[in-house]
Image (cartoon, coloured by chain):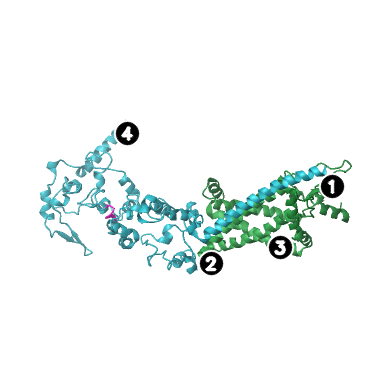
Amino acid sequence: MTPMSAGTPKSVSIVRMSFMFRVQHALLMVTLLVLALTGFALMYHENWLGRNLIRLEGGVLYRGFLHRAAASLLMGQLIFHAFYMLFTRGGKKEFGEFLLVRQDFADFLQAIRYNLGTAAEYPRFGKYGYKEKFQYWGATLGIFLISVTGIILWAETFSMRFLPKVVLDITLIVHGYQGLLAFVILLFWHMYNEHLHPSVFPMNAAWLTGRVDAEWLRQEHPLEYEKMKREGVL
Amino acid sequence: MKGTVLTAGLVVALLGMCAPGLPQPASARISLEKCTLCHGKQEFRKILVDGKIRELFVTADSLKGSVHEKKTCVDCHFDISEIPHRERPRRVNCTHCHYKGNAEGAPQSDGYLAYFESVHGKAIARGNAKAPLCQDCHGSHFILKVKSDASLVAQGNVAETCGHCHIQIYAQYKTSVHGVAAAKGIKEAPSCTGCHGEHKIYSPKDPKSTVYATHVAEQCSKCHGSVSIMSKFGIETEKVETYRESFHGVASQFGSRTVANCASCHGTHEIRPEADPLSSVNPKNVAKTCGKCHPGANANVAVGKMHVDAKKKEAGIVYYVASFFKYLTIGTMLALIIHILLDMYGRTKRLRGEK
């Protein structure tokens, strides 16, 4: 983005992702990538890409080990994240920002109305707008649900005692589609918001540097920008 | 030069040694009549050490109608050079005539070469006297063409032939769905050779075997995957496909030897239709069958279809769940794309307004 007024001094950057969040984000990225590569290899084993992926992963046996190892890491991370968000100073602050409120749904509808031309104003977001919040809660809930079906399938000998075969068949189908849905959402939501969106293209570097440009914040998250101004951070 | 002379000498010496074994001119042969002096008597038999009786009754009619009609005793029993013979004649060696390019014009395929590599041929090579030679399956005196229905190795008879040694397996096979069908004269029903092969029979633990763990599904699907064969008997061919798509099938295709193949659940020689209470896949028995690999499997495994294809309506609730998720995924994708386009349009408008 080009600065709006000529009088603005050289761009100021501010912290948006703390070190702990960057570590968690990187770990999440790695585990999700491994899970997708090993999971879709099995789901699409009949085409050449799936077949070659399974070969690459050392056959069905090691593909399974890899998938479950990454899943264990992801589930561990989910638990850690819950504790971090609820019981640490840094976490609690962010958790408050992430809480879904009625305003978010109103913002979402207003954004659509604005984009369709029936609302005069585009919603003004705080630190996290509806895009970030929906992504965050969707991912958290999704990881939790896919873990449930994953554990049922992992402990198949145990599950067989309590669940009829038809339920296990459904579990397998649901687990695969949960993965596909997560992938689709990452591709069309996260990719757009953090890579393709003109304000961040080609990438919002905050996941590496932790910092964003103050001018970017003013445009995309004006409420947060104003709050920082009031608090004298800027 | 020296080598050639040596080789020639060796060949001559070998020929000399083998001379009694070579077919001799008719005049020098022992005539059929001389053999039947003793062997033509109906009560001519020998009681063996273990109490078994070896019938030795052979007449001029013994070869009549067989493929060897025109042969005489010593054509095959060529180690007999005096009468009465003192020693028990050696087992007949068929490859004496049946080799590629033989002067007799005896029919020859590569079958015997494959035999030497097979579990039977190797057992013979190890010195197992009970392992079968050609004549143990094809018959000794009354050999018919393989295509003839009366041949010992014909589709309708081969199971009984194998059963001479493999008695228990034969008994299991006889009452199995395949055995019963074969007994009814159904040509498509497999007998032993249908699954195990003919000359190239290997131990099921040998990766070369057609019934090796990772080959079983492929072998069964030769018939069970063929619509033209299965439609005659009202059997679905999609069982092959649903297996291939299942966890078990995928693992098997990628080389797992411990995962279930067709035979793990349906049995091998004792395969019976699902409705048969003795069948391993009868709803009452599946808990036990699954329990072989999944300890603790109980009646729950019988609740729901076994070979499920989530893409077909017959799968019931599994189909509807899969369809729901399919449209949910497509719908989500469309909604997200629309959102992206709208958002970009709106943003352009917003920036224009700001300027």
Magenta segment, which residues? B153-158
Instruction: Report, in whole angstroms, how far the alpha carbon at label 4 lies from the one at label 1.
Output: 95 Å
Going by the numbered disc 2, the residue's amino acid type is: Leu
Is label 2 or label 3 in front?
A: 2
* Mark 4 secondary-structure assignment: helix
Q: Which chain is cyan?
A: B
| Nearer to us in this view, A114 or B184 | A114
Per the image, label 1 sits on a secondary structure element best described as loop
Image hue for chain A: green
Is residue A199 at least partly visible in the picture? no
Q: Nearer the viewer, residue B220 or B7?
A: B220
Of labels 3 and 1, earlier in sequence is 1
In the rendered image, which residue does mark 3 sit on?
A82
Q: Position of residue A234 (x, y in %)?
A: 87, 51
Is residue A106 found left or right of B5 in the rendered image? right
Mark 1 or mark 2: name the one nearer the start of the chain.
Answer: 1
